[in-house]
Image: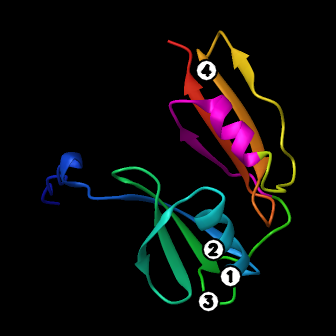
Amino acid sequence: MTAVPRPSVSANQKQITFLYYRNLPAAMRFYESVLGLSLAIDQGWSKIYKVTDGGYVGLVDETRGSHRANEIKPVQICIRVEDVDAWHRFVATQGVEGLRAPRSNEELKIRAFVFNDPEGYQIEIQSALD
């Protein structure tokens, strides 16, 4: 068998985490209005939002995607920001479920809080302590 060289990782363009929703319009409103993300790629039943320069989250209509929405949400979207406390003050005004107070973790050297999106995926907002 002939060895095939692996393409360069530095040539990767995007990292997209796809989440599956029963109510895609509600998820879109949340990611746009609460998190302030911009729609980068509109594929109709799949909406891809830019989180960072190379990081994206894809929202997928479960009736069309590879998976189905599930009550168990073993995925957390974590967004690193400059001022976690400012983000907490804002998110607290948005009526989100599962909002917890910011906490510092000296071992991980982060300050963070969590809350849930409309279908229960956990969002973590964190800042570095250093």
Within 10 angstroms of label 4, few (less than 14), some, or many (20 or more) residues? some
Q: CA distance from mark 1 to mark 4?
A: 32 Å
Vertical placement of residue 64 versus 41, above or below:
below
Give the mark nearest the N terminus, 1 or 3: 1
Q: Residue at x 56, y 15 (%)?
A: 129
Which residue matches tag 1?
25
Point out the frontmost of discs 2 and 3. Answer: 2
- Circle 3: residue type: Arg
Vertical placement of residue 10 versus 96, above or below:
above
Q: CA distance from mark 3 to mark 4?
A: 38 Å
Point out the frontmost of discs 1 and 3. Answer: 1
Q: Decide which of 8, 16 is in the foreground and name it.
A: 16
Q: Secondary structure under badge 2?
A: helix
Which residue matches tag 3?
64
Give the mark nearest the N terminus, 2 or 3: 2
Q: Residue at x 27, y 58 (%)?
A: 13
Q: Quadrant of residue 14?
A: bottom left
Give the mark nearest the N terminus, 2 or 4: 2
Q: Are marks 1 and 3 in contact (CB under 8 Å)?
A: no
Within 10 angstroms of label 1, few (less than 14), some, or many (20 or more) residues? few
